Image: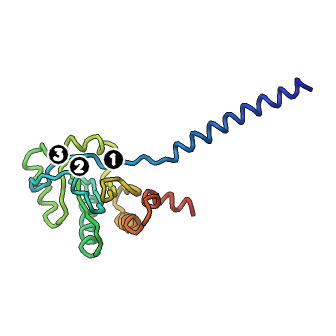
Amino acid sequence: MRKNLRYILLPLALLLSILSINVFSARDTNKQNILRFPAFQTVDLNGNTITNKIFTGKFTVAVLWVTKDENSRQLWRCLSDWQQAEASPIQIIGLVGDIKSTDDAAKISYARQMTADFAQPQLLVNDDMAEFLTNMRAAPTICFVDATGRLVGQPVIGYEPELIKKEARRLLATDSKADRNKSLFMKKASQ
């Protein structure tokens, strides 16, 4: 009897220890990392110095785009029109991903011509942003930044103007920080 009990209790104890490890480690993985847009100092296409204080007090849609991509340019036109038509406190800024602040004047002039119709600031990439931007593998990529510089919501990749508008409106409408940190995917999964 004792020998049989040992064969039952030993696997049962092993199973319970595996489950308890899983439960305790799952609690840590549910914590969200608070990601912030990195501190930076760069220039826009007009040569004005811009820092990460551009986010202070404003909900921002940050668009990483490249001059060589037609979808990026079409998305900019759509977002620019939306910002002008929408009476909301949304700030939209561009991060020109394929032109650095140290590039020659011809490249910068080309980007300036492309964005001449847009009132939104277009920031040139520099080393302060490099590590952050290496995580973005496609253009356009859209991030949402709250008034304190925290990245919130779900990033949008590609030409998805309606999804961008929907996520921006959702983030503006949420009252609690927990809701603001939920992505659209997580909201659908919890329903």
Q: Residue at x 27, y 58 (%)?
A: 72
Question: In the figure, residue 1 lies in which quadrant?
Answer: top right
Residue 138 placement (x, y as % from top left): 33, 49
Upstream in the sequence, badge 1 or badge 2?
2
Residue tagged 2: 97
The image's mark for residue 100 is 3
119 vs 155: above or below: below
Label 1 with label 2: CB-CB less than 8 Å: yes
* Left or right: where 177 falls relative to 30: left
Looking at the rendered structure, the kind of residue marked 1 is Met
Residue 58 versus residue 45: which sits nearer the camera? 58
Label 3 with label 1: CB-CB less than 8 Å: no
Question: Crowding near pointer 1: few (<14 within 10 Å), some, many (20+)?
Answer: some
Element at badge 3?
Answer: strand
Q: Residue at x 28, y 71 (%)?
A: 82
39 vs 59: above or below: above
Label 2 with label 3: CB-CB less than 8 Å: no
